[in-house]
Amino acid sequence: MSLPAPALHATSSPVATLPPSPEAIAAVTRALAASFGNRLVTSLAVRQQHGHTLTWITNQPPDAVVFPQSTEEVAEIVKLCASHGVPVIAFGTGTSLEGHVNAPYGGVSVDLSQMKRIIAVHGEDLDCVVEAGVTRKELNEHLRDQGLFFPIDPGADASIGGMAATRASGTNAVRYGTMKDNVLALTAVLADGSIVKTSSRARKTSAGYDLTRLLVGSEGTLGIITEVTLKLHGIPEAVSAGVCPFPSIKAACDTAIMTIQTGLPVARIELLDDIMIRGVNLHSKLGLPETTMLFVEFHGTEAWVKEQAERFGEIAAEHGGGPFDWATKAEDRTRLWQARHDGYWAGRALRPGADTLATDVCVPISRLAECVEETKRDIEASGLIAPIAGHVGDGNFHTQPLVDLADEDEMERCRGFIDRLVKRALAMDGTCTGEHGVGQKKMKYLEAEHGAPALEMMRVIKRSLDPQNILNPGKILVL
Amino acid sequence: MSLPAPALHATSSPVATLPPSPEAIAAVTRALAASFGNRLVTSLAVRQQHGHTLTWITNQPPDAVVFPQSTEEVAEIVKLCASHGVPVIAFGTGTSLEGHVNAPYGGVSVDLSQMKRIIAVHGEDLDCVVEAGVTRKELNEHLRDQGLFFPIDPGADASIGGMAATRASGTNAVRYGTMKDNVLALTAVLADGSIVKTSSRARKTSAGYDLTRLLVGSEGTLGIITEVTLKLHGIPEAVSAGVCPFPSIKAACDTAIMTIQTGLPVARIELLDDIMIRGVNLHSKLGLPETTMLFVEFHGTEAWVKEQAERFGEIAAEHGGGPFDWATKAEDRTRLWQARHDGYWAGRALRPGADTLATDVCVPISRLAECVEETKRDIEASGLIAPIAGHVGDGNFHTQPLVDLADEDEMERCRGFIDRLVKRALAMDGTCTGEHGVGQKKMKYLEAEHGAPALEMMRVIKRSLDPQNILNPGKILVL
C-alpha cells in the first residue's frame, strides 16, 4: 500500500474574494441594523475611529461598526458575516500601533467596549473572569479593595481582550510575564460562529493542544476573544522604585543583565535614553538629568525590598551608575510610572505636530546594549528624531521616530531605518516585535524571522480555522 | 454575492487506514535498515521496551525502532513513513504514564536518545539550546559549573524533548512554571517531513502564532520535537527546605493557599498524605511521622530565605501544623527531594508485586482540600490502596492505586475510582490532567473537559497539520 505523500498545502481552502461586493456589505449592514438597532453605526466619523489612528499608518475604516453585549451576539455577527463572506475585525480600544484594527477590505468592526462585565473574582485562587471589553485600569480599580492586582501594563489603558489578542506585555513583564503567561483560559468565537471555551481555571494542564496560547497573539485572525480568565497577583506588601542615571547605554544594559543574572526578582527595569528623558521632562515635568536612565521597581516584604534595592544599587555602582533617587512614597512612584507610561506622548512632545512610527523589537539580553547603541547611531546618521525606551529585563525596546508625513524624503529615511532596525534584531536572534504585534506593518518581516516552513505552518492553521479568510484579513499572514 | 457558510469540517482530509498493511511496514523497515544499519532494530525485546511499560496500560510495541542522530535524519524517517502511510511515534525515555508511546497501529518508534548534544549555553541570556534526547539530569550536570540550572523536574529523569512534548512540570513549577513557560523555541519535524524552527531566543515576541506552545504538549501528534531552546535560571545563592506535619489535608492545603496568596515565592510546596509518607518511609528510610506532610523549599539570598521560612512557619502554625524540621545542609535536602521524586517507587513499596495506575488531576487551589479529601474517602470506600502526593501550590495532585491486574473485581473498582476522580476535578473547574498528559487513557475525558467546539478545533488543527494521521495516531484525539 502506498498512500500519496502528504502535503501541508493539501488542506488549503479557497480564500474568499476580498473585498466583498457592495451588495454583501449592504445585506450584512441591513441585517445588523435590524438586530442591533442603534448599536450598529455607519457614520464616517465612527468608522474612521475604528480604523488605525495612532501612528503614520493610513486609516482604513470598516464599512460598519457594531457593539455587541454578549458572546452570543458576537457569534450572531460572525455567522451573518460568514454567510456573506464579509470581513470581521475585532476592536478593543484602538491603541494598537501596527495597523491591527484597519479594515483594508472593509467589513464589520466588532467593538467589544460594551462587554465590560467582571464576571467573577476568585480571590483564593488568584484569578478572575472578565469580558473582553474591560480595560486593565478598570480591572485594577475593581480589584484594589481585595488586595489583588493584574500586572500587565502596556502604556495605554487597553482592553483585556485586545491585550490577549496581541499578546501584550509592558513594564512588569520581566517579573510577571506577558499575556501568554497570565491568561488561563479564553472564550472565543471562531470563523464559523462556533463558541469555544479553552481550558479551565486549573493553574496548569496537559489536557490536549494549547488553544489558549494559539489564540493569544493571533490578533483576531483565528477567533474573536470575548471572555478571558486571568491570573491575578497579591498587591505586594512593600514596593520601592527608583531612578538611576548611567554614563552610557552599555553601562545601563550591563546593570540590567547582572540584575537578572543574579536572580534579583526586579518587578520593573526600564531603560530611557537621553532623548526620551528629554521628552519625559517636557511632558511630565520630572526634571531628570538628560542622560541614559534606568527606572526600576522592587516588590516584596519591607525587608526584602530593602535588600533588593541595596543589591541593585551595588550592581549599578559597579557599572558607573548613580546616584540613585529612591521613591518610597506611593504618589512619587505613581508619578514616575505614569511618566513612563506616557512615553508615547512624551516622545511626541519632542516635535509638536509631528507624526510618529512607534515600533519595537526584542533581542537576547546579551545583545541589547549593542542593538540599542547601533540603533542610536543609525538614528543620528539618518537625521531622525527618535527617542528609545525599553523593557530591558526582557531585551525589548521601543523607538518612536517623529516624522512629517508630508516630507517624502524624511519618510523614506524613516522606512529605511525601521527595516534596518528589524534586520539588526533578527541578526541577533531576536524578533521583529516583542510586544506590539504584527498587524499590517510587520507582516513583511515574518518570513525572515520564522523561515518559510514555520510561516507555512501558520498559514495551514489559519486556512483550516478560517477557510474564507474573514477574520481580520490582511493581518499577520499573506495567504 | 453570497458565499457558502463556512464549516470547520470542510477542511478535514481523509484519514489513512490504520493499521498500515504488512507490505507498507516491510517496505519502510527495509528502507530504514538500508539507511540506518544497526540503528534500526526490530527485535521483540527492544520493540516492547518502546511500548508502554510503567503502568497497567497494555504494552503495544511498534514494528521497528530507529535511532536517528540529527533533525535531518528524523525528517528522512518521517518522509519515508509518510510516503507509505506508516505511523511514527516519538520516543524519549519512555517514562510517560498514560500510554503516550504505545503503538496501537504499529509503525516506527523514533527513539531520540542518540540526540544528546548540548548545542549552546548562553549564560548571559539564561538560555540554552539542546537536542531532544538530553535528559534533565544530564543538562543540570552540564550546567552546574556555570552556576545555572533548569528547574523542571518530573519525577523521572525524562528527556527534554519528551518533557516538551508532554508539557511536563514537577515540584518546582509553582515558582518556575512548566515546560510551556520554559521553552523559548523548538525545532520540529512535521508530518510531511518539513523542518520548522519556531521563534527565536528573544524572551518575548508578538510575531505571529505561538507555534512553540502549540507543539508543547502535543505529545508527538503534530510534530516530532528534535531541538529545544530552554530558559535557564541562576542557582539560588541560598536554599532552605523543610518538612512540616499537619493534622489534616485541609490544614495543609489551607497553609499552601495562604502561602501563595501572601506572595511568598515558595519554590516547592509538596503535599504527601499519610499513605504516601508510609511508602516514602519504606522506600527511602526517612522515618517521618505517618501523617499529612508538606515538603517545602525556598530559594533566594540568605536573609530572604530565612524570612520566607519564618513566614511560612507562622502560616503553618496558624493552621495547626508543626513542628518543622528544616534541612539547611545540601545533602539532607537532596535526600528529601530524592525521596519525593521516588514517590512512584515509594508508592509501589506499599504493595510489593502490585501494578499501578498512576494518574493526576489539577483543580483551582481553593477546591484542593475538598478534592483531595473526597478522593481519600473514595479510595477507602473503593477498598483500594492509593497514596496521594501533590504539587499543591498549583492545585495538582497524583494518586497511584496499587492493583493486581489479574483481579478483575479490583480492576473494575479502580477504573470506577479514576472516572470519579476526573469527574470530581472537572466539576471543580479543573482539568483531567495537570502534567501527565492525555496519551491513550485520558482521551475519553477531553470532551467533558473542553466541550465539543474546542475539541473540534483541536481536530481541525490535527487534520490540517497531519492529514494522514501518521504522527502518534490513537493519542489525544479520536479523529
Image: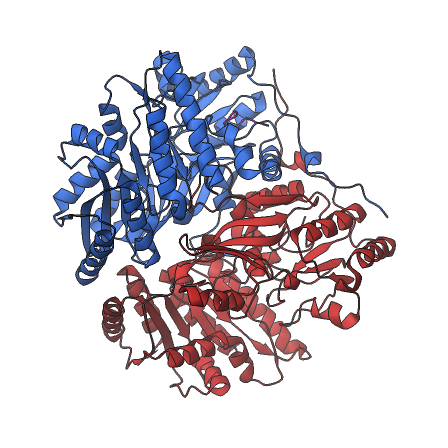
Chain colours: A red, B blue
- Most common SS among magenta residues: loop
The answer to whether A352 is drawn above or below residue B306 in the figure is below
Which one is in front, A220 or B83? A220
The answer to whether B23 is drawn above or below residue B304 in the figure is above
Which one is in front, A374 or B190? B190
Q: Which residues are magenta?
A: B469-474
Estimate the x, y position of residue A36 in percent, counting from the top left: 77, 59
Q: For residue A71, say whether it is visible.
A: yes
Which one is in front, B157 or B323? B323
Whether residue B388 appears in magenta in the rendering, the answer is: no
Count of numbered badges drawn on the protein: 0
Estimate the x, y position of residue B37 in percent, counting from the top left: 39, 19
Estimate the x, y position of residue B442 in percent, counting from the top left: 47, 29
The residue shown at (53%, 23%) is B81
The residue shown at (43%, 23%) is B416
| Residue B209 as seen in the image, left or right of residue B361 | right
| Residue A201 as seen in the image, left or right of residue B56 | right
Q: For residue B43, say whether it is visible.
A: no
Which one is in front, B472 or B78? B472
The answer to whether B301 is drawn above or below residue B175 in the figure is below
Q: Quadrant of the N terminus of chain A?
A: top right
What is the quadrant of residue B82 in the picture?
top right
Estimate the x, y position of residue B45 in percent, counting from the top left: 34, 14
